[in-house]
Image (spheres, rainbow, N blue to C red):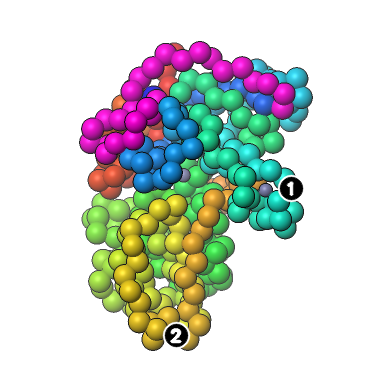
Amino acid sequence: MVLETPAKIEAQPLTERECPVPEPQGGKIRIRVDACGLCHTDLHTVEGDLALPRLPVIPGHQVVGRVDALGTEAVGFREGDRAGVPWLYRTCGRCLFCLKGRENLCERAEFTGLHADGGYADYIVVPHDFAYPLPEGFSDSAAAPLLCAGIIGYRALRISEVRSGERLGLYGFGGSAHIAIQIARHWGCEIYVFTRSQEHRALARVLGASWTGSAEEEPPAALDSAIIFAPAGNLVPHALRVLGRGGTIALAGIYMSPIPELEYRWIYHEKAIRSVANSTRQDARELLDLAREIPIRTEVETFPLSQANEALLRLKQSRIRGAAVLTMTG
Ligand SMILES: [Zn+2]
Ligand SMILES: [Zn+2]
């Protein structure tokens, strides 16, 4: 499913195309795709909210499949191995950020489904050292949301500086939040979930939220940390209003509508607002380990690849329970 010209998802900008099967050169491996998760970033790609470095491009960066060919310098995988591909496609390994262990900020980073063709396809080619073995016990479609929703949710938890036993607010309850809540519960945190969707509130309570409500409501106690998953800048003042002294708000999206003007007293008492930008390979490995250890249970709704437009539309309308995943046939 190829994007040639960005447009609102209602106009169905992705089109089905026959493309040549890509060849893995050098250190790359080729994966025959079985499942690919959908992410809000895909929506921002398809609708042109993000600057697009190349067109046409195949979106999709939560890719699960089997290795079916290896370049001459590829190591770490054998034909038939299950492998996952996340958003981080390649980093330079030489810039200051790469050298400081902050490769998520690499100035020459490339991303799957943006700089390189992604997983809305039967095959994908990826550098061997940016693909991951996946934990047993997860079907292909259940594993897919771990690869962005899971990894970004995990990084957002760390950026939010929430500690064991503290109170954490989650704004928006889609694919990423439904995984992050399971990690935070594992850490013994108390979770308040703010979302308009009654269905999302019900899922949040099943997964251990002790309170659910709307962003305008007052939770039972002040938050130590919050994560805003919804791409809505108007949520920032709401979160600041119920955030305690010294608290941190993590903004988990790659895109957000404008944040309204803030009064200084709202951020006084050393409150912090931090964005979450991409993730490192270390984040991916830690999240996949946690997924096996907890174990994380993903809720997925699956759609055939040919219905990528319809599935993204449902994602935009918050009409997905848990995470949406495309499955390949044949
Ligand atoms: Zn770099
Ligand atoms: Zn993503």
Whether residue 22 appears in magenta in the rendering, the answer is yes
Q: Is residue 97 left or right of residue 145?
A: right
Amino acid of disc 2: Tyr
**Residue stretch in magenta:** 2-27
In the rendered image, the vertical position of residue 18 relative to residue 211, given as above or below: above
For label 1, the residue is 94
The structure residue drawn at horizontal position 34% and vertical position 35%, both measured from the top left corner, is: 6
For mark 2, does the 10 Å Cα neighbourhood hold few (<14), some (14 to 19), or many (20 or more) residues?
A: few
Quarter where residue 38 is shown: top left
Q: How many marks?
A: 2
Instruction: Give percent across and percent down for residue 87.
Output: 53, 41
Q: Foreground: 226 or 71? A: 71
The answer to whether mark 1 is within 8 Å of ligand 1 is yes
Residues at marks 1 and 2 touching, judged by CB atoms closer than 8 Å: no
Image quarter (top left, top right, bottom left or bottom right) of the C terminus: top left
Q: Is residue 115 left or right of residue 131?
A: left
Among numbered discs 1 and 2, the one appearing first in the sequence:
1
Q: Secondary structure at mark 2?
A: loop
**Is 43 inside the magenta-drawn segment?**
no
Disc 1 marks which amino acid? Arg
